[in-house]
Image: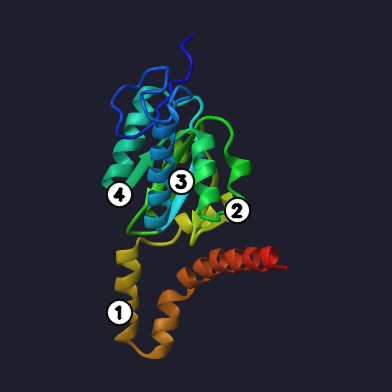
Amino acid sequence: MSPTPFWWESDCEIPFFAPCGRGGNDLPTPEKEAVVKEIQERLERGKAMIVAEYRGLNVQKITQLRRSAREAGVEFKVYKNTLMARAATALGITGLQKYLEGPNAFAFSYEDPVAAAKVLAEFTKNNEELQLKCGLLEGKVISVDEVKSLAELPPREVLLASLLRGMQAPLSGLVNVLQGNIRKLVYVLSAIQEKKEAAGA
């Protein structure tokens, strides 16, 4: 039986069983530093990031996931866990390191904060091998349940359209239109606020 392939980066077109260039154990220090800097830039630029373990996924399914991510404007990457941990620590992100075990993939949303969560959550419905582990929203780690709640929110464009429709209606209409979406968003954001307060205590 063939081992699970390492898919070290979404732009690497070689789905072999060893790291394909950047991200591997054999990287010289200057190249490792370059990868850490690259990760930092993605973390700073991204509105959200979702972490998922892809153990058991074959090349065909990984290719399918990459395609779905690309179509949704999501960047799907696989980095060495230690390099992701270094980048997160450099940015003052806490709580992520405990999830950085096993073969992890990282999905970055740069425009729509719910896009990455939607793509991965949808993919897991028919591919149980992909396991959601956590997410990063507003620089704070969120749980799997919070990732799933984020995935249930409508895309940014739909939410804005609903908001505009509601603004054209009486105030009661606006509340009715957005009530369900706001409830889900408040759930995620309130959990982040609680974590901020706990960290500062």
The answer to whether marks 4 and 2 mark residues whose Cβ atoms lie closer than 8 Å is: no
> Tag 3, which secondary structure?
helix
Q: CA distance from mark 3 to mark 4?
A: 13 Å
The quadrant in which residue 170 appears is: bottom left
Q: CA distance from mark 3 to mark 2?
A: 24 Å
Dot label at residue 94: 2
As shown in the figure, which amino acid type bears the numbered disc 1?
Arg
Q: Which residue is mark 1?
A: 165
Sort mark 4 into few (<14), some (14-19) or many (20+) by Cα contacts within 10 Å. some
State the image coordinates of residue 77 (x, y, percent, origin top left): 39, 38
- Residue found 32% across the figure and 30% down from its top: 63
As shown in the figure, which amino acid type bears the numbered disc 2?
Thr
Q: Which residue is mark 4?
A: 72
> Tag 2, which secondary structure?
loop
State the image coordinates of residue 8 (x, y, percent, origin top left): 40, 29
Q: Which residue is mark 3?
A: 121
Dot label at residue 139: none
User: In front here: 60 or 194?
Assistant: 194
Sort mark 3 into few (<14), some (14-19) or many (20+) by Cα contacts within 10 Å. many
As shown in the figure, which amino acid type bears the numbered disc 4?
Ala
> Tag 1, which secondary structure?
helix
State the image coordinates of residue 151 (x, y, percent, origin top left): 45, 55
From the viewer's perspective, tell me whether residue 12 is left or right of residue 107: left
- Please name which of the two marks, 4 or 1, marks the residue nearer to the observer: 4
- Please name which of the two marks, 4 or 2, marks the residue nearer to the observer: 2
